[in-house]
Amino acid sequence: MSLAGIAPSVQVGFAALRVNPLRTTLSALGVIIGVGAMVSVLSLSDGVESAVRDQIARDGRLQSLGVAPIVEDVVDGQRFPRAKFDTLSSSDARSLSQQLQGLGTIYMNASGAGYVSTPGAATAKRRAALISATLASGSSRAGMKLDAGRFFTDAEVESKSRVAVISRELADAVFGKSVLSPSAVGRSITIQDSSFTVIGVWTPAVDPQATRRGSLLAYIPVTLAESGAITLPISATGGFTVKAARLEDLPVVQRRVESWLAHRYGNWRKQAQILSYAEEGAKLRDNMVIFKLLMSAITGISLVVGGVGIMNVLLASVTERTREIGVRKATGARNRDLLAQFLAESVAIAGLGSVLGTLLGIAVSAAVASIMRARTMAQVHAGFSASTLAVAIAAPIVVGIAFGIYPALRAARLSPIEAIRHE
């Protein structure tokens, strides 16, 4: 069946719809409501999923793997520390980073208390702060937004540069509150007995339920702690954390970490361990998919109801136009021409419902998301993914064809003589 052959029949179908626009609109109403409900629910589902993913990314645990050496043996339920074990260093982190090929970010952190002061300050003026030795990726791990300056780079970590990024409260405690954040950048401080240059200042996020607001914090390159260049009451960094770029990437990241450990240790399971929430993450991914499919199935029922409405209208149209159908068949119209005519009418009605329903669904989902944000702490915004758009386009077309096929077949199978005699 060529497109040129059925084009006149399609034109006849569209002309029949234009003759009675009110009936066409009313028959499309069910599809409008069905598509609107489906799009709004899917859009809100996309928004909720995006909010959950953002929360997971901020928390980090479900997207992360802990890689650490085994430091103790368990015998008959009792733990015995190992006298010797192989620690993981920043050079190992760089090696693994190449293996991950952008699928994940590696974090290392060792923290301990240390004294901070300005060079030459009296012992009485030293302030105790939490010193964190970390990689250049530490800023993203901490969700840090600098007030001034920058975080240290990979090159500075490798070269063991004596640079530090300090909190605003520590800058106030050491330099005085009159010194603004930009002015603190470039100044020198003493951590323990070592001199450092301040290259960045940031204000830590405040926990609304915390009793103590603000902290005396400083970040330094992890290689300084590894090499013993600075004396801190912290143990050598024995492991690191690998955070996958996406929740779905975690299984691939774990396989690559295991491959890297096997290359480094051979029988790595006796030397190192991988700690993760992989099972919980898999359950969460499955739950999100199930939730979206469930919502789609529920709203799909209203779309089916709209399809039944289209079928009823087309059946009534076949009955009303029986004599017209008989005349068309008597003058040479083939069964497939009538089939194309009524299917075109059905798909056109469904297409109209799809366009109007999609606009309705977007408006409803935006309004509901706004109410959710106003009434709760959840930062939910209406989303509109490619899959939602595909469903909004494909579902009405499928419904139009599925529920238009019976009226179209009924019209095509009419006897021309009986149809012309129909009153």
Image (cartoon, rainbow, N blue to C red):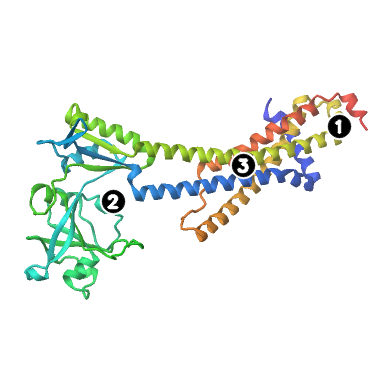
x then y, percent, for residue 243:
30, 43
Q: Residue at x 53, y 49 (%)?
A: 44
Q: Which residue is mark 1?
A: 322
Q: Which residue is mark 3?
A: 299
Question: Please, what is the three-letter code of the amino acid marked with disc 2?
Answer: Arg
Instruction: State the mark number for residue 81.
Output: none
Q: Residue 159: tell me if it is visible.
A: no
Between 255 and 151, which is closer to the camera in this rendering?
Answer: 255
Quadrant of the rendered image containing residue 192:
bottom left
Please tell me how crowded label 1 is: few (under 14), some (14-19), or many (20+) other residues with Cα within 10 Å.
many
Q: Residue at x 6, y 60 (%)?
A: 193
Question: Dots 1 and 3: beta carbons under 8 Å?
Answer: no
Question: Please, what is the three-letter code of the amino acid marked with disc 1?
Answer: Thr
Q: Which residue is mark 2?
A: 141
x then y, percent, for residue 27:
75, 43
Q: Is residue 67 above or below residue 54?
A: above
Q: Is residue 403 above or below residue 20?
A: above
Question: Dots 2 and 1: beta carbons under 8 Å?
Answer: no
x then y, percent, for residue 390:
55, 40
